[in-house]
Image (cartoon, rainbow, N blue to C red):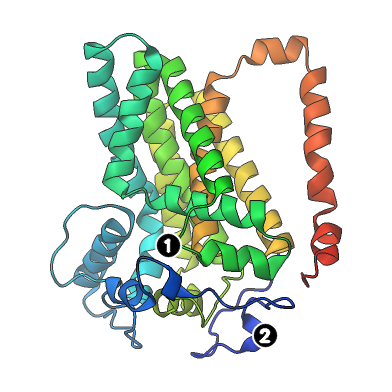
Amino acid sequence: MAPNKRGAAAKTDKENRPDLGPGEEPYDYASSVITKEEVEARGSGTQEARDTYDPRRPLLSELRVFFTGIMFLTRLPVPAWVDHHPAYLMRAVMWFPLIGATIGLWGAAWYNAATLLWPQPPALAGAISTLATVWLTGCFHEDGLADSIDGFGGGWGRAQILRIMKDSRVGTYALVGTALILQAKTGVLGALGPGGAAAALVAAHAAARWTALPLTYGCHYIQDEEDAKRGLYNWFAQSQRLLTPPRLAFGTLSTMAVVVLALPAAQALAVGATVLCMTVASAYYGHAVLGGVVGDYLGATIAVTELAIYLVLTADWAAVAARWQPLAVLAAAAAVPVIYTRRIIQVGGANC
């Protein structure tokens, strides 16, 4: 894993930016419907250079941290004195799992109501529940998922991937990939049924968002002075030290509590193993290809991990135990591009 840039300088340099390949230019926001200035203006508080967290008033300061997490992950209204201050946002990462559990409860309420009104087809309840949760979150993680699919699908090398991920326009890879993932999600939610979907939604939304804690804490957060959101994310990268071990522990323990309370012991263990595997795989792949992580990549990890949890909970493990050979072949085939990731990227002209 790349070294953590804790306490980095306030200003980034060329070594910390995504290098452009021959003939490549930074993304031109003039061709976008939304201008660069409009994107920058959306995040109130992102340009604040001082950390105003007051340890002498921990309850009030922590309340602002919590509301910052609510503002960042959902469309719920928050007090007027809350903004996107990166120092508060970094501390708020510890609240992501509990906020995710709340989002899961919202989705579960819609799922149960939909199954009562429309018992068939089962996937309809999954679609309605998914629509409810993406409305509540403003398609936040799905946006990161789409950008990441576009970047990794269309980019050949680190610089191209990062440049495509910054592009606000949706490409073919993003459209097809996101549609298929959402279709799979609605399908497996329908397969879980009224007896299992509600608990799975709460556990999955909490556990998937836990991945942001270790990835933010342990991975290098890529900074880019050309990004329209640099005021938020570059400050965010420089304040990684504010996600302290106690905050990491709180987020982990709260995630474990939600999963254990929501699911039977065997399923809770399966969810825990799934989340750990997804986190390790995401950290490895992000470091190997990008040299770290970025916000869109974290969002994609959350979205894919949520789907992976549903797949694990609906899998027929008895059939797997009886006939495991097809899965072994699939695992071997899937490992090939991962093993040769560095060589592939180097051939493409990037320097990992």
Mark found first going from the N terminus, 1 or 2: 2
Please tell me which residue is depicted at 44% across the width and 74% down the height of the picture. 29
- In the rendered image, residue 145, in percent from the top left (x then y), is placed at 51, 49
Q: Is residue 253 above or below residue 234?
A: above
Quarter of the image for the N terminus: give it: bottom right
Residue 15, disc: 2
Residue 247, disc: 1
Count neighbours of disc 2 (C-alpha within 10 A) and say few if under 14, some if 14 to 19, many if 20 or more.
few
Q: Secondary structure at mark 2?
A: helix
- In the rendered image, residue 161, in percent from the top left (x then y), is placed at 64, 63
Q: Is residue 59 above or below residue 201?
A: below
- In the rendered image, residue 303, in percent from the top left (x then y), is placed at 49, 44
Q: Looking at the picture, which amino acid does disc 1 mark?
A: Arg
Q: Looking at the picture, which amino acid does disc 2 mark?
A: Glu
Please tell me which residue is depicted at 51% across the width and 43% down the height of the picture. 175
Find residue 236 and report its image quarter.
Answer: bottom left
Q: Secondary structure at mark 1?
A: helix
The residue mark sitting in front, 1 or 2, is 2
Count neighbours of disc 1 (C-alpha within 10 A) and say few if under 14, some if 14 to 19, many if 20 or more.
some
